[in-house]
């Protein structure tokens, strides 16, 4: 894209029957940028992520990734192109180990055929070794090495959220969609999450769109903020400017707070 944006939404609208969920939302993010997407409950934040990842199809508008139109692409195709996401409730495979959950995320990079896999040919063995090495690198990155062989349902909730985070990273994405990753975490777990997010930005250079309700985390970490209110873009800019915007304060706290 001419302006360096890796992902762009142009006037995206979404409706379910008579309910207008998104109304002409436009936003873009660049490589290595952390764009926080905030707004009151029901503002349409997760719906934006669902449109990007192909779960929802917009009624109008377009979504471009790396210069290609992905507005009508299917979710598995979008994942293969390089867009990964986390979910509010993890959506992990609870009776599989941490390593096995991350290996599932490597499906987009599997290029071996069913015959070769059935015979476990040398090419297949080499590919499996490479996938396991990639998973181990992610586990080291998020500091989960000692839990690699534990079943996910035996882990504390906060650690399960980190596993979901790691699974998205195992896809080697160009864009990472984070849907309220701090929800349900205690203070120490939030600090660990913040550290991982900053490392992704500075060391891996992955663009992130981050849905978040913790305004202190947003103020401390985000490069830019985009605010939604009832499906409409309300404000966008640097954190210190946006969080002082009277319209944003009113959307969160009521009109009296904006006076």
Image (cartoon, rainbow, N blue to C red):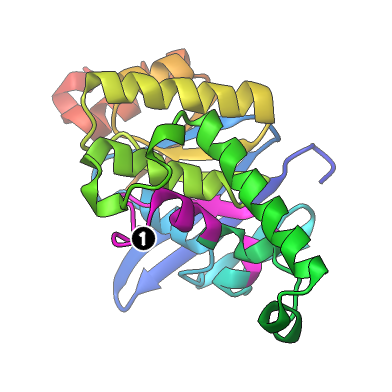
Q: Is residue 137 magenta?
A: no
Secondary structure type for disc 1: loop
Locate the C terminus and report the quarter of the image it occupies.
top left
Q: Is residue 75 above or below residue 106?
A: below
- Mark 1 crowd level (few <14, some 14–19, many ≥20, 10 Å Cα): some
Please state the horizontal and vertical placement of residue 138, each as a whole percent of the image. 57, 38
The answer to whether residue 255 is left or right of residue 240 is left
Q: Is residue 134 above or below residue 200?
A: below
Q: Which residue lies furthest to the right in this view?
A: 2
Q: Which residue lies furthest to the bottom in this view?
A: 115
- Count of numbered circles in the view: 1
- Please name the residue that numbered disc 1 is placed on: 96
**Can residue 245 be seen from the camera position used here?**
no
Q: Is residue 217 above or below residue 185?
A: above
Q: Does the magenta stretch include residue 79?
A: yes
The answer to whether residue 75 is left or right of residue 30 is left
Magenta region, residue range: 77-103
Q: Who's the residue at 46% across and 38% down the image?
A: 210
- Residue 184 occupies quadrant: top left
Q: Who's the residue at 51% across and 56% down the image?
A: 24
The residue closer to the viewer here, 129 or 19, is 129
The answer to whether residue 119 is left or right of residue 184 is right
């Amino acid at each position: 894209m001419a302006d360096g944006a890796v992902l762009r939404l142009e006037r995206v609208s979404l409706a379910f029957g008579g309910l207008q969920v998104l109304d002409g939302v436009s936003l873009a993010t660049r490589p290595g940028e952390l764009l926080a997407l905030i707004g009151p409950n029901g503002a349409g934040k997760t719906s934006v992520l669902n449109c990007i990842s192909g779960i929802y199809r917009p009624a109008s508008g377009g979504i471009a990734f790396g210069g290609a139109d992905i507005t009508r692409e299917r979710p598995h195709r979008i994942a293969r192109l390089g867009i990964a996401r986390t979910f509010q409730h993890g959506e992990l495979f609870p009776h599989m180990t941490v390593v096995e959950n991350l290996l599932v995320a490597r499906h987009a990079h599997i290029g071996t055929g069913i015959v070769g896999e059935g015979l476990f040919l040398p090419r297949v063995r080499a590919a499996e070794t490479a996938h396991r090495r990639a998973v181990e690198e992610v586990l080291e990155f998020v500091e989960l090495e000692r839990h690699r062989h534990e079943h996910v349902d035996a882990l504390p909730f906060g650690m399960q959220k980190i596993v979901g985070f790691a699974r998205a990273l195992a896809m080697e994405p160009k864009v990472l969609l984070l849907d309220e990753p701090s929800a349900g975490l205690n203070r120490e777990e939030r600090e660990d999450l913040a550290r991982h997010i900053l490392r992704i930005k500075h060391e891996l250079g992955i663009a992130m769109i981050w849905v978040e309700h913790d305004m202190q985390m947003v103020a401390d970490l985000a490069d830019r903020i985009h605010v939604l209110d009832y499906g409409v873009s309300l404000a966008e800019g640097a954190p210190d400017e946006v969080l002082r915007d009277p319209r944003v304060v009113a959307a969160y706290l009521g009109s009296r707070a904006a006076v």
